[in-house]
Image (spheres, grey):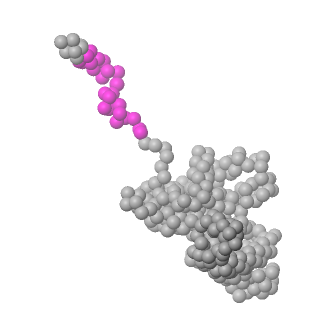
């Protein structure tokens, strides 16, 4: 009986309060839950109907805000330290001119690729920042070149001329023309080195076990099985590694010599560079980067994480065999790629919050 009495009291109080609540405009619990916006501000899936401002005054305004926000982020972050990639203070680099031009070509690229999949211009800006920090003459260890850091085979696939592609690159007035063909030697030697590396590891996969077996053989006065084969494999791998290093050193010197003192904002220099290596220009590389991201987004159902990781490590590396996540892909387990994507999220956030 006591519980029934309490239930009656509760019902009566609720009924008495209902008209008052209605008069005050208060919502019922169900209505209150419906009114609360529970959407997270975090979203890694680019919707296929995303429409950045790409035409007219809205596009011009967005381009200006994108450039300004990026420059503000750089100034606030690197005002008292050397810029990454450049290795010099901000006062010695005209980033304003570069970032404003890059913003223009990003929107141009997004406009061209929108039929493939919509791409966030601010994300592209953050990605270029992570790739090269806007240094058009940036050259990576693997010979990725330019603000978008394309390696030669990928660049050629998007219609770009790269250093060493033409016979005239091996003649004057190009500097160190004798090294123009070293890029081909580098790629050939690198593939042979990879094959030799796999062969050596195939003989005795675990080097810890190899060391232990060698020590036991030495202590007992016995012989190590496959010792001669393993030493021969090591010698072959080492010789090919030295060829790779030599070709890399020579071709890097060739690039640096022909980039030295050049200015892509000088018409004469720009004409030379267009006939030497288009990766250091803006229009073709940025359009190609945006198109590549659009293709990756389409292939990974809008997952910007997998799309960006695919740009860095190859789209195939982002495949996920789990049928639940297969269409979205994943970040591959490469330390470089994980760090790369992590920086992209921060760059994107810092640029957007300043816009």
Q: Is residue 165 visible?
A: yes
- The quarter in which the N terminus is drawn is top left
Residue at position x 43%, y 55% from top? 47
- Asked if residue 190 lies left or right of residue 1, the reply is right
Is 168 drawn above or below residue 193 in the view shown? below
Q: Is residue 114 visible?
A: no
Residue 53: give x, y in percent of width and height.
51, 56
Residue at position x 76%, y 74% from top? 249
Residue 257: give x, y in percent of width and height.
80, 74
Is 10 drawn above or below residue 33 in the view shown? above
Tell me where the magenta segment starts and ends, as one range.
Answer: 10-38
- Asked if residue 211 lies left or right of residue 303, the reply is right
Residue 156 or residue 311, whichever sits in front: 311
Q: Main secondary structure of the magenta part?
A: helix
Residue at position x 67%, y 48% from top? 73
Residue 181 or residue 276, whichever sits in front: 181
């Amino acid at each position: 009986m006591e519980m029934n009495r309490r239930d009656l009291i509760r019902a009566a109080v609720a009924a008495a309060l209902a008209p008052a609540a209605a008069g005050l405009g208060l919502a019922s619990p169900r209505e209150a839950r419906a009114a609360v916006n529970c959407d997270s501000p975090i979203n890694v899936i680019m919707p296929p109907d995303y429409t950045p401002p790409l035409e007219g005054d809205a596009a011009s305004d967005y381009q200006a805000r994108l450039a300004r926000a990026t420059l503000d982020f750089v100034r606030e972050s690197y005002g008292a330290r050397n810029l990454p990639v450049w290795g010099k203070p901000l006062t010695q680099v005209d980033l304003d001119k570069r970032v404003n031009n890059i913003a223009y070509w990003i929107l141009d690229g997004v406009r061209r690729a929108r039929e493939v999949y919509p791409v966030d211009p601010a994300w592209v800006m953050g990605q270029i920042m992570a790739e090269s920090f806007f240094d058009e003459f940036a050259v990576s260890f693997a010979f990725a070149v330019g603000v978008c850091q394309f390696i030669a085979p990928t660049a050629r696939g998007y219609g770009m001329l790269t250093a060493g592609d033409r016979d005239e690159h091996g003649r004057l007035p190009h500097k160190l023309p004798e090294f123009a063909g070293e890029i081909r030697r580098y790629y050939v030697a690198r593939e042979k080195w990879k094959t030799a590396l796999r062969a050596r590891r195939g003989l005795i996969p675990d080097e810890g076990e190899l060391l232990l077996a060698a020590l036991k053989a030495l202590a007992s006065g016995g012989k190590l099985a496959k010792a001669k084969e393993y030493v021969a494999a090591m010698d072959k791998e080492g010789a090919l590694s030295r060829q790779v290093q030599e070709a890399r050193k020579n071709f890097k010197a060739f690039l640096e010599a022909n980039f030295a003192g050049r200015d892509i904002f000088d018409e004469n220099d720009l004409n030379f560079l267009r006939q030497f290596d288009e990766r250091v220009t803006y229009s073709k590389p940025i359009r190609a980067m945006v198109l590549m991201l659009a293709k990756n987004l389409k292939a990974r159902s809008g997952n910007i994480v997998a799309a960006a990781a695919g740009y860095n490590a190859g789209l195939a590396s982002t495949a996920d065999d789990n049928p639940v996540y297969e269409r979205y892909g994943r970040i591959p387990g490469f330390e470089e790629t994980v760090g790369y994507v992590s920086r992209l999220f921060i760059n994107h956030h810092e640029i957007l919050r300043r816009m």
